[in-house]
């Protein structure tokens, strides 16, 4: 992604760094929540240079946690309505509305990757067992102490050897 396409992320990172810097200058009492916000902002800043989608995800996570007060990017100023911090909520909703398609795409890619994992295990076992003879495959299938993916791979190899 080009820099001009990252304007919301850059604006949010700048605002977070201003908030963190003001907190360090005017109120140097650091809590673990403040340090976690600082680490999250650093991670988003670094990720912005190399992986913009990851930076968007990190910023969304940091702002989401900041909204409910689990992490605190500012110890100097905040506007709250009960337990909800309004400034992080506004930034969270802004980023979410502008980058919804990116975040949704990342989640869909993750789901597709998880669904492909069982097939990759079967492919691994097929590669391991491809040199076995027909009888060796049958004897391994008779063994009850075999994982389901290995059993599936052996059954597929057995079927392939039958058709040859």
Image: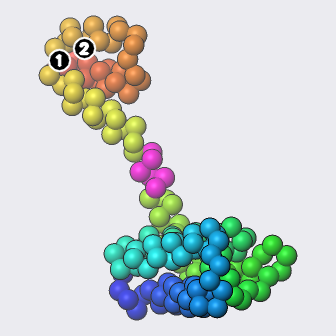
Q: Main secondary structure of the magenta part?
A: helix
Which of the 4 image quarters holds residue 74? bottom right
Give the residue number, with chain letter if any, for mark 1: 132
Residue 37 position within the rendered picture, expressed as x and y whole percent measured from the top left:
58, 74
Q: Relative to 87, say whether 143 is above or below.
A: above
Task: Please state the extent of the stretch shown in magenta in the rendering.
Answer: 110-115
Q: Secondary structure at mark 1?
A: loop
Is 34 within the magenta? no
Q: Residue at x 77, y 86 (%)?
A: 79
For the C terminus, the image quarter is top left
Query: In the image shown, does 108 or 21 lie closer to the viewer?
Result: 21
Q: Is residue 41 left or right of residue 123?
A: right
Residue 1 position within the rendered picture, expressed as x and y whole percent measured from the top left:
36, 81
Q: Residue 137: which disc?
A: 2
Q: Secondary structure at mark 2?
A: helix
* Label 2 crowd bin: few (<14), some (14–19), many (20+), radius 10 Å: many
Q: Is residue 53 left or right of residue 23?
A: left
Q: What color scheme is it?
A: rainbow
Q: Residue at x 51, y 60 (%)?
A: 107
Q: Residue at x 40, y 22 (%)?
A: 147
Whether the residues at callouts 2 and 1 have beta carbons within 8 Å, the answer is yes
């Amino acid at each position: 992604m080009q820099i001009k396409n990252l304007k919301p992320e850059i604006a949010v990172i700048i605002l977070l760094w201003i908030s963190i810097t003001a907190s360090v200058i005017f109120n140097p009492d650091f809590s673990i929540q403040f340090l976690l916000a600082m680490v999250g902002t650093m991670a988003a800043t670094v990720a912005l240079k190399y992986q913009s989608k990851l930076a968007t995800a990190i910023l969304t996570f940091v702002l989401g946690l900041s909204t409910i007060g689990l992490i605190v990017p500012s110890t100097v100023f905040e506007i709250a309505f009960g337990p909800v911090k309004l400034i992080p909520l506004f930034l969270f909703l802004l980023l979410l509305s502008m980058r919804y398609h990116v975040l949704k795409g990342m989640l869909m890619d993750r789901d597709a990757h998880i669904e492909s994992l069982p097939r990759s295990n079967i492919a691994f076992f097929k590669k391991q067992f491809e040199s076995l003879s027909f009888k060796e495959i049958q004897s391994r299938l008779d063994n009850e102490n075999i994982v389901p993916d290995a059993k599936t791979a052996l059954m597929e190899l057995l079927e392939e050897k039958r058709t040859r």
